[in-house]
Amino acid sequence: MRKTTSTNYENEQTLHEFCSAAFTLSVISGRWKLTILVKLMERELRYGELKHAIPGITERVLALQLKALEEDQLLLKISDDTSGHLPMYSLSPLGRSLEPVIRSLSAWGTTHQPIQNCR
């Protein structure tokens, strides 16, 4: 987390004020956030299912990225205290609103990326 008094943070805020695309990218940026969102577009998943669905992600990074996406209100952590199962993760309505953006990014990547791994 960046200090809110840093010049870097202030520059980022200024950029967001006049460039909506930069704001959007800052919300979904990070090595794994977009992949997590893509997986949750398909269906609700538990932590272990997400870990299995995303090869190479560490448990620590997955936990941090899920927390950040939840703080940004892009996903919901659904706990069923009665069953004793681990919580489910799903896209929030705000996260669902990113689906057309993510599908466009994916289509662009399919067209221009030599090796297609993420869908």
Image (cartoon, rainbow, N blue to C red):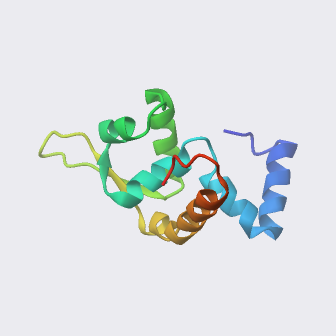
Where does residue 40 sit, x and y in percent of width and height? 39, 55
From this viewpoint, which residue is outermost toward the front? 114
In the picture, the quarter occupied by the N terminus is top right
Quarter-of-image position of residue 23: bottom right
- Is 34 displayed left or right of 90 in the figure? right
Q: Nearer the viewer, residue 31 or 107?
A: 107
Where does residue 6 sit, x and y in percent of width and height? 83, 42
Q: Quick check: 43 above or below 51?
A: below
Name the residue: 31% across, 40% down: 49
Q: Quick check: 91 above or below 18?
A: above
From this viewpoint, which residue is outermost toward the left? 83
Quarter-of-image position of residue 28: bottom right
Q: Is residue 70 visible?
A: no
Name the residue: 59% across, 46% down: 115
Q: Is residue 29 visible?
A: yes
- Is 53 displayed left or right of 82 in the figure? right
Quarter-of-image position of residue 91: bottom left
Where does residue 110 sit, x and y in percent of width and height? 58, 58
